[in-house]
Amino acid sequence: MSHRYNMIRGYGNEQQFLLPVNAMDWLSENDITYGILEILSILDISPFINKYRDDGRGSAFFDPRSMLGIIIYSMIRGEKSSRKIEMCCHYDIGYRIVANNLTPDHTTIYRFKKNNSKEIKSLFKQLSQIIVESGIARIGVLALDGSKFGCNASLSANKKLKYLEAELGRLFDESQEIDELENDDINIQDMEINRLPEHLSTKEKRKEVLNRAKEKLIERHDIESKKQEEKILDREKEELESGKKKRGRKPLEPKKEPSSDSKVNLTDPESQIMSTTNGWIQGYNGQIIVSENQFILAAMISDEQNDKKLLIPMLNELEDLFTGIHPSISPNILLSDAGYFSYPNSLAELDYGIQLIIPPSKERKIPEYSDNDGYISRMEMICRAICMGEIITFPELQSIGTFVWQSFMNREKQATTQEICKRVMEVRVKSPTGRELYRKRKYMVEPVFGNMKHNMRFRSFSQKGKENCEGEFFLAALVHNIKKLIRFEGIVKIKEFATNIIKPSRGSGFSYIFANTVCKVGIDTCRFIHPLVYFG
C-alpha cells in the first residue's frame, strides 16, 4: 500500500533560493525595525562621523547609523550584553536589517557606546526638539521625577579616608623598600603581584586609583561645606526679616577638613551610596522631565541623592532644549512631588517663566481649599506687599483665613516670605484646579521609569564614571522616545513626519500649546495658575 502524506515540503537543506530574497519581506510591515530605520534616516549623525579621519587613511569604520540601529534595537529588546548582541547580529533577522547586514564584534559595540557619550546626548536633544516642534509632544504641562540606578561598582568598594591615607602610606614605604633592593641588585620578581586587574597591576597604578578617590572625597567635602555656609546665611537672613530667632537646631559650622570616616568608592569614585525602597545601592540619581504623552524632553544623572537640589539643574536642561525652538513654543506648568520643594526652588519660576506645582509636604497632610473663599487673591496681595518691603501685621494675616492665622500664631509682627511661599504652593496643589492638574503627574512620569526598568531592563549602568553612565542614560531616554514615537504615530506616519520635518509646527505657537494644556477648566478658573505669583 502506498502512503501519500500531505506534507508542506520535504526535508532537505541543499536546495538554494532560485531568486534573490529581500530579507525585509521576512518581517511584518508594522515591525518596529522599520520605524527605527525611518527615524535614523531623519537624524543628523555628522557628530559621530566627524570623529573619524577624513583623509582616507586608517582602518575602515562601521557606519554610525548601523551601529546606532544595533544598540537602539537591542535596548528595545531588553538586551544589554555586547556578546549576546554580537551573536544576534549573526542569527536574528531584525538585528541584521537594522545593522545593514553588518556583524560587528562585541568589542566594537561596547567601544561605540563608551566613546560616543556626548554624541548620544546631542542626538537625544535633536530628536526631542523635533518631537516638540512637530507638535507630537504635548508640552502644556510637564512632569519631573527621579529614580535611582545602580552602577558597575560594589558597595564593599567604599572605603574611608583614613583607609586611603594608610594605604597610600604603605605603598610609599614599599616603594622606598623596593628602590633599596634594586640598588642592591636583588631579584624582586617574586614580590610583584601578578594576578591583579590591569588598572591595579602596579603600585603606581594603585596609587593613582587611591589618589583619585581621595581627590574626589576632598572635592565632595568642599561642595558640602559651601552648601552649609549658604544654609547659615539663609537662616540669618530669615531671622533678620522676621525680627525673631528661628526655632529649631542651627546649622553646624562646616569642618575645614573632610572627616576620616568619609567614604568614597574606589571602583567608581563619582558614584554615591543611594537609598531605595529595596535597600542601598551604589549608583546615580536619574532625573527626567516628560510631556503629558510621556515623551522625555530633558534628562540627567547626578550623584546627589536629594531631589531637592536637582530642580534647578533640570530646569536648565529644559531651558537648553527650548533655546533652539521658536519662542512661541514653551511649556506652561511643571509638576513634581514633595521631594523637590524648597524656598529657592519655588522662586525658580520667576527666572524660568514656568509655573511650578510642588506640594510642600505629603499631599494628604495639606488641607483642601475652595476657589471662592477669597484666599488666593488675598495671598497674592500679601506676597506682593512683602516683596515691596511692607510690614504684614497680625490682623492682615488673620483676614486671609483661619488656617493661615493659626499657622502664624508664633509671629508677633510679620510672616517670612518662606512661610507665605509655602502657603501659596499648598493652595496651588489642593484647590480644585490644582488637584486636577497634580493628579496627572503619576501617570505622566512614573510609567516612563517603569518602561525603562522593566521592559528595557535598564536598572543599572554597565560602565564606570559619570560621563559614561550619563551616555547610557541618554541612550535609554533616546530609545524610549523612539519606541514611543513609533507606537504613538505608527510606521506609516513616520515617513510623513520625516518629509514635513522642516515645515513650521501646526497653528500659531501659543494657541497650539494652550490647546494641549491638560487643564479642562477655563482660563478664568485658573487665575492663580497662569499669572506668576511673586514670592520674594
Image (tube, rainbow, N blue to C red):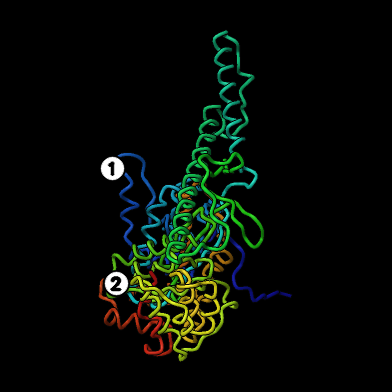
**Position above or below: 401 against 158:** below
327 or 70, which lies in front? 327
**Residue type, mark 1 in image:** Gly
Q: CA distance from mark 2 to mark 1?
A: 33 Å
Q: Could you tell which of marks 2 and 1 lies nearer the N-terminus?
A: 1
What residue is shown at x 43% (from left), y 80% (from top)? 379
Quarter of the view holding residue 517 = bottom left
Toward the front, the furthest residue is 412
**Residue type, mark 2 in image:** Ile
**Position above or below: 68 against 434:** above
Residue 525 placement (x, y as % from top left): 41, 89
Residue that badge 2 annotates: 501
**Residue 69 shows which numbered tag?**
none
**Position above or below: 44 against 371:** above
Q: Is residue 133 left or right of residue 185?
A: left
User: Are circles 2 and 1 on residues that touch, CB within 8 Å?
Assistant: no
Decide: few, some or many residues near mark 1? Use Cα within 10 Å; few <14, some 14-19, many ≥20: few
325 or 222, which lies in front? 222
